[in-house]
Amino acid sequence: MKKIKRILASVMVLAMVLAVAPAAFATEYTGEGNALTDVTWTSGAMYIVTIPATVALGNTATISASNVRLSVGETLNVKLTGTSDTDNAFKLTSGSNELTYTVSKGTDNVAVGDVILSVPAGTATGEQVLTFNEPATAPNAGDYTGTVTFTIAVVAPVAVTGVTLDKNTLELTAGGAAETLTATVLPDTATDKTVTWSSSNTSVATVANGVVTPVAVGTATITATAGGQSATCTVKVGVLLTTITATGKNTYSQSVEGMVTVTLNNIDKYNSNYGWLYKGTIIVEPVAGYTITKCRFIQNSQNLDDDSAPFSIVMDSYDQMYMYPVSVTTSTGQKGSWDMDGVTSIEVYGYAN
């Protein structure tokens, strides 16, 4: 018997949304050289998908879709199904003998479950050429016949239900470093997770692909939108207004006067190397006409931490400090906690209203 290496195509029909279990339509091969006509599956006025009835190993097969008329958001998907191993090699058997081969789309091999043709709503036609690669060495295994199955399904759109950002506020410095916002689109299975970004005031801050760049002092709202849902982040851009420097247990100096007020309560100790130490409270507030966007705490000229202000910083042990909004000293109102040995100076950033 002449050795034949031929794959027969069959079609597993239509898994439309809310449809009943799909029926199967399979071709039959009657002999070498007696190729059957192409398999065509038509779903009313929605689409026509055509798959070659047979294809010999070493040849190509074109999967095509025409007359595609879907509702907005729907997508026609054709998947390759069957049996393959971990190397994406498909298998044919003849008795106790086995032949493996690969199917490729362009330069990449495809595996079971891969979408090999996808046509979105608004597109009437589509096609994809697959190559059924013959093994370099074919075993002497008699006649090989087998079936490759294609699953055809119309996938309904999954709507976006929400968008979140990893930060709700940003405090930046005019002309300083940019920061990146990360948007999460829900659910993860949403059909279109494309995020568009916008700034309410590009003269203050711009945004591109989530990267927020400070331009000039002021406030801007950054909005991330996907599928009609959105999330926002308030961006405050300031400049260095003044630097508060610890000069004694209950004294300090300012590089520029008249922009903020400083209140020292019960400072336990002062050291010229470490600044204010151990216990006590430091309160920084803007005077009328100014807005503080950020404060940076400095010890020995090293940036230790920063946060927005007005604030009160409470030192309650040798190396532990806590940040609170002004007049709040409970754990529920805590804004930050970190290890530090003291505060030698505080850089205050903001702008005139």
Image (spheres, grey):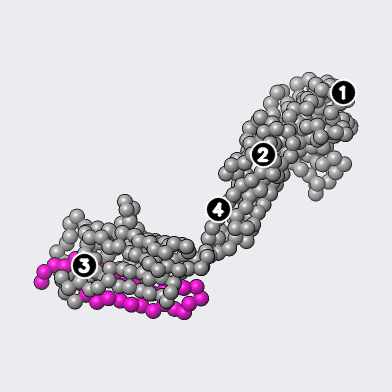
Q: Distance between the Cα atoms at labels 1 and 3?
A: 91 Å
Q: Are marks 3 and 2 in contact (CB under 8 Å)?
A: no
- Asked if 39 appears above or below 304 in the picture, the reply is below
The type of residue carrying mark 4 is Thr
In this orientation, does residue 38 appear? Answer: yes
Q: At which x and y percent is residue 306?
A: 72, 35
Q: Contact, CB < 8 Å: mark 2 with mark 1?
A: no
Residue 103 placement, left or right of 115 = left
Q: Identity of the amino acid at label 1? A: Thr
The answer to which of marks 2 and 1 sits earlier in the sequence is 2
**Of the image marks 2 and 4, the number of the one nearer the N terminus:** 4
Q: Of helix, strand and loop, which one carries label 2?
A: loop
Q: Give the image quarter of residue 335.
A: top right
Q: Comparing marks 3 and 2, which lies closer to the viewer?
A: 2
What residue lies at 87% left-to-right and 41% top-to-bottom?
327
The residues tagged by marks 4 and 3 sit, at their Cα atoms, a distance apart of 43 Å
Question: Mark 1: which secondary structure?
Answer: strand
> Sequence order check: which comes first, mark 4 or mark 1?
4
Which numbered dot is residue 251? 1
Residue nearest the viewer, comparing 232 with 40: 40
Mark 3 or 2, nearer chain start: 3
For mark 4, give the secondary structure: loop
Alpha carbons under labels 3 and 2: distance apart: 63 Å
Asked if residue 28 lies in the magenta stretch, the reply is yes
Q: Which residue is mark 2?
A: 202
Q: Which residues lie in the magenta part?
A: 1-29
In the image, residue 29 above or below residue 56: below
- Residue 194: which disc? 4
